[in-house]
Image: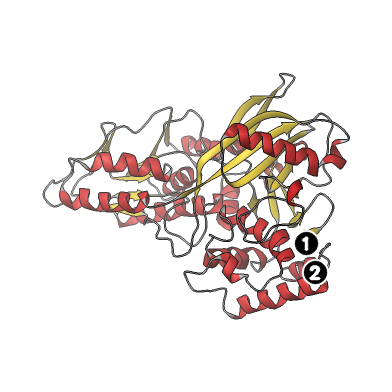
Amino acid sequence: MKVAIVGAGWAGVAAAVAATAAGHSVTVFEAARTAGGRARALPANLPDGTPVLLDNGQHILIGAYTETLRLMQQLGVSEPDAVLRLPLRLQFPNGDGLALPRWPSPFDALAGLLTTRGWTGRDKWSLVTTASGWQRAGFHCAPETTVAELCRTLPPRVMDRLIDPLCVAALNTPSARASGQVFLRVLQDSLLGGRGSSNLLLPIIDLTGLLPQVALQWLVQRGGIVRLGTRAQALRWVADPGSGVPSAPPWQVNGETFDAVVWATAASAAAAELSRHAFGAPDPVANPILRWTATTRELAFESIATVYAYAGGVRLPHPMLTLRSELDRPEPAENAALQGPAQFVFDRGQLGGPVGLLALVVSASTGDRANVQTRVLAQAQTQLARFLGGKTLAAVQTVIEKQATFACTPGLHRPSQTIAPALFACGDYVDGPYPATLEGAVRSGLAAAKLLSKVG
């Protein structure tokens, strides 16, 4: 079939590769001139004017991202050249926190827990018994359960130093509002998913080069068409207007006819564009489009802020550290006066970037750019003082993705991948078991390509 893919983010390029591998003729439309969507490269300059390539948000992968890793391998991406693989480490600047050894699962998690610094024996035993209960229940809970309710028996120290950072990193939603069921699925796949499944995979090249750019090159080499800087402005149903059932190529994109269309833009953009295109289509086509867009518009979103800061020559003890942060919890956290919005800091100098460049990440971010940047820089200056050696961090760039992810709340109803006849959606927000992650996006793209077999 002749297939249009609208959007060249991680979901779109995954769909394009899978559809091409299945023998379809693929054309990709991307409004931006750079592929990658919300996980793409971003040019910037250090305070001294030196050019540097950042990302429009600091992303990580984990070993449980099986489909993403499989796709990278299919495209010829060498893992050691693309990511730094490390055992899971959620440690604070003072060394407290969880650090897993390079052992097989689940022994790595158990050993890491037993050697966690800054926890009492009661803290550790409480987590062991609680996690054992989750395992006995098959990692299932009532749909309306939040992560905070799921972990209500855990001591505040375990919540502050493990559950809250892990929850906001995985779901980008604070534990008081986050889905317990999705959290359990993430834990199951990462901590019990086999050797290396809990590993951190930190990109050492820019996000566009990590997968989207390679995918589009692979596509072109196999006869695919890639149109960067080209917005899909006109989607039109052109088949039998009476039945809504295609007897010939049913869709036109920008005047070009296609057998099927996979819409792979962000959720809000997809809802806005598709509702506009529904008008003029026959009812059997227009009505399901309008139902799908109505469901998509019900999604709430969370913001992510990434503050890039620089102090020449600075090196952290690890490529990634956890920070004391102001997570949305009913109890006051320890050392509140020293806290700030960011939950994590990444040493980009250890990840292929210039030495001294840090990326500070605020998941579920609130507030305007200037306020967030000021508070994050003050937080970093205080919490990382021992590594800064008296140097002052200078802001490089602050990137805020206002709709970075959907709010992963209990019982959330997500839109399906089938929109209308021969019209499908993919993206990290569509129906599926995972939160809004790179793996969720890739899996949705692969699933959309499989749905093409139902056309005709």
Secondary element under disc 1, as helix, strand or loop, is loop
Q: Nearer the viewer, residue 347 or 441?
A: 347
Q: Is residue 261 visible?
A: yes
Could you tell me residue 364's position as x and y percent?
A: 57, 48
**Relative vertical location of residue 159 with respect to residue 276 in this rendering, above or below:** below
| Label 1: how many Cα within 10 Å (few below 14, some 14–19, many 20+) | many
**Relative vertical location of residue 182 with respect to residue 372 in this rendering, above or below:** below
The residue that label 1 is drawn on is 100
| Label 2: how many Cα within 10 Å (few below 14, some 14–19, many 20+) | some
Residue type beneath disc 1: Leu
Could you tell me residue 357's position as x and y percent?
A: 75, 33
**Relative vertical location of residue 437 with respect to residue 227 in this rendering, above or below:** below
The image quadrant of residue 105 is: bottom right
Identified at 55% across, 36% down, the residue is 213
- The answer to whether 310 appears left or right of 331 in the picture is right
The residue that label 2 is drawn on is 111
Could you tell me residue 409's position as x and y percent?
A: 49, 60
**Relative vertical location of residue 116 with respect to residue 245 in this rendering, above or below:** below
Q: Is residue 323 visible?
A: no
Is there CB contact under 8 Å for labels 2 and 1? yes
Residue type beneath disc 2: Ala
The image quadrant of residue 129 is: bottom right
Structural distance between the alpha carbons of marks 2 and 1: 7 Å
Identified at 72% across, 32% down, the residue is 309
- Of mark 2 and mark 1, the one earlier in the sequence is 1
- The answer to whether 257 appears left or right of 268 in the picture is left
- The answer to whether 59 appears left or right of 253 in the picture is right
